[in-house]
Image (tube, grey):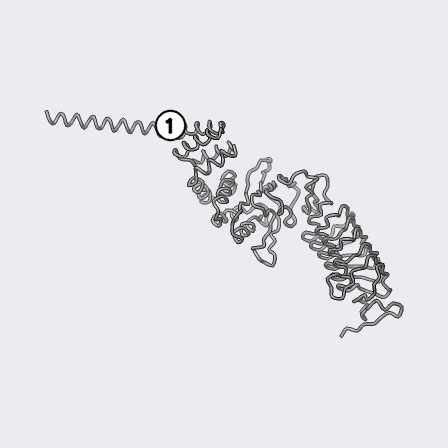
Amino acid sequence: MLKFWKKSTDSDFVIDRKGVLVRYQGHGREIILPDGIKKIGAGVFSRHSDFGYSDVEKITVPEGVTEIQDNAFCASNITEITLPSTLKKIDERAFIHCRNLKSAVIPDGVREIAGSAFRNSGLEEIHLPKKLEIIGDYAFCDCRNLKKIDFPETYAPVIGNGAFVRCAGLADESGFFILQNRLFAFNEEIYGSTEEVDIPDNVIHIEGALFAHYDRINITMSLNCPSWPVDLYSGNPALAISIIEKPGSTLSFRNEEGTIAAKVILSTEGEEVDVKNDFIVSIHCKESGGFDFASYDRMFSRLERDHNRFETALVRIQYPYELREEMEEQYISYLRENGYHTGCTVIDRGDLKTLSYLEQKKVFDEEVVEELIEYAQKNEKYELLIALLDYQDKAFAEKEVYRELELMDDDAGEDSTEGSAMQEEE
């Protein structure tokens, strides 16, 4: 059974026999903790603890303290903290949601800053210890005001998943914050665009769902693309998020020459939740590097809306990298069945390149081409009109010659039959 005792000089501090501060019963805004404490206990100054005192603003932690435990200052009003050289570990969520905490000097004795320790805090700058060994998962995630971190110069700590995700203030002049070849943050104001984003080739991993909340973003990266996680909250696919999440967003892949060799689109607008999120889950890369196109292609049959099927097929056949023959035929067959709609959409977009590609794939039959010629003329898309007329001339002229020859043969056959009949009568 836990026993408590109180220092005779200050009954506001409840410390157990192991030296853990388990409760503060006072009302101070500026607190100096008494000597003899070994650890600051879980939830002692937390707003979300039944017994926590969260109104502390400044606190001095004495020498001898080795650990700040889980949620110790969670969502408190703390603005300033002085930490001792004896401190070894800052535990999970110790300073999470401390929005008034602007800076912190972590003593060089600290070996671990655990998961979410400073997540969503108000930190603007922080000094990290020289021999820090571990920065836990999401330790500084969502510290949006963080602009400066003094990293150890000669020591590389193990950095957990999402440790600096969305710390946009840390981005350099490129608009990215890249650490250990991992992309943690993107600053759209520095980069200058939220529609076209080119990921540097040295990035081997993109942390979290970094671009998921941007509408219709096009992200370009190398074919041997960085890896990235697909988050399934509580294992629920209906709550999936990946590198892109908003319908109409695309991933483009450049080859070694810098040419776009492959492209996929997240076209799920109006789909049922399970289809939408299964499609998001399919947007992932192989563990060994490179995008898993086969997994993406398998999702085509799950789409219910014609608009989504059309956009997916249209993009994929134009960039058929690692496209299996049976899937290519499935995509083309769909576009062929909807030839007039396909052509009208391309004409509306003024997309001559796509029109030419569809013509090469023989997506349009003779009747559809005639309708598209009329549509292009009506909408004054003259460049595409010329292309359609040229295609009609080349694709169906030979067919028309054969048709005329067949008619001539039929006429000749009729003349021969009539001549034979006249000879028999004679």
x and y percentages locating residue 197 in the rendered image? 63, 40
Position of 35 relative to 125 (above/below): below
Please give the name of the residue rendered at 83% of the width and 72% of the height, measured from the top-left corner: 5
* Quadrant of the image containing the N terminus: bottom right
Q: Could you say which quadrant of the image residue 249 lies in?
A: top right
- Vertical position of residue 200 compared to residue 356: above or below: below
Q: Nearer the viewer, residue 386 or 164?
A: 386
Locate residue 253, reporting x and y percent.
Answer: 58, 40
**The C terminus sits in image quarter:** top left
Mark 1, secondary structure of its residue: helix
Seen from the viewer's position, the closer of residues 335 and 260 is 335
Q: Residue at x 74, y 66 (%)?
A: 50
Determine the residue located farthest toward the left in the rendered image: 426
Residue 305 position within the rendered picture, expressed as x and y whole percent measured from the top left: 48, 47
Tell me if 10 is positioned left or right of 122 in this view. Answer: right
Left or right: residue 379 compared with residue 396: right
Q: Amino acid at mark 1?
A: Ala
Residue picked out by circle 1: 397
In the depicted view, which residue is nearer to us: 333 or 43? 43
225 lies left or right of 64: left
Relative side of 320 to 81, left or right: left
